[in-house]
Amino acid sequence: MTDALDPTRVFRKLGRANALANLRLHKAVALLQPGEFEATRTSFFPSIRATLNHILIIDWFYVDALEGGTLGPKAWENEEPFADPTELRAAQADVDRRLVKLCDNLTSHDLARPVAVHRGSRIQTDRLDDILSHLFQHQTHHRGQVHAMLAGTSVKPPQLDEFIVGDDAQARAADMAELGWSETDLMD
């Protein structure tokens, strides 16, 4: 068990909550009828496929920067790298694992560490904790859009907010097991 005042704890929990929400959302998308994944819908991006690809490429962009990489705008050279929902789900799971690992290895000193974000013609420098906060907000924002778009399909939108508090342990048990995690992974 970590120190009760450990400022990195929230990021470890958010990293796992993000991966669990993505898992549930992608499992729901896998149940769509032919044509529903790419169908034009009303939202910021024109389809479930476009929105989920956007989440992925921005995750690539920021996770790479957080890991010290220089991927930069190459992340979105192809705005929809995956037309197949199964391949998209696998790519999202991969970057989610990277983000969880990054969050699991944070120290309190890391939070104020400057992160170089390669933006093509310039380098943005921000604190690691601010980049993580922005990334988690971005993911939640766009997952909410996919959730709303699913309401217009044959698939019921999944519950996406049962991953932080202890009282929700039963509701997340199957998804936690699928990822090979236990409740102790959320306690530290």
Image (cartoon, rainbow, N blue to C red):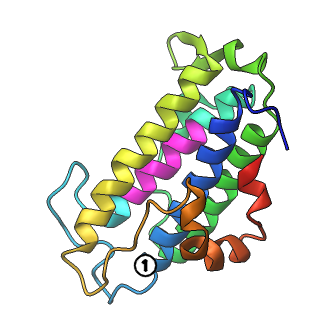
Q: Residue at x 55, y 63 (%)?
A: 167
Q: In which quarter of the image is residue 2?
A: top right
Looking at the figure, which quarter contains the N terminus? top right
Q: Which residue lies furthest to the left in this view?
A: 42
Q: In which quarter of the image is residue 169?
A: bottom right
Left or right: residue 47 compared with residue 97: left
**Front-most of 121 and 172?**
172
Q: Residue at x 72, y 76 (%)?
A: 177
Q: Where is residue 76 in the image (x, y as percent from the top left)?
A: 48, 41
Q: Which residue is drawn at 50% across and 71% down?
A: 24
The reply to whether the magenta stretch includes residue 141 is no
Q: Position of residue 121 (x, y in %)?
A: 50, 12
**Front-most of 19 and 63?**
19
Q: Quadrant of residue 12?
A: top right
Left or right: residue 105 compared with residue 159: right
Magenta region: 51-61
Up-down relation of residue 124 to residue 162 (above or below): above
Q: Which residue was labeled with disc 1? A: 28
Q: Which residue is drawn at 57% across and 31% down?
A: 132
Q: Is the magenta stretch mostly helix, strand or loop?
A: helix
**Residue type, mark 1 in image:** Ala
- Count numbered badges in the picture: 1
The reply to whether the magenta stretch includes residue 58 is yes
Q: Position of residue 179 (x, y in %)?
A: 72, 70
Left or right: residue 92 compared with residue 147: right
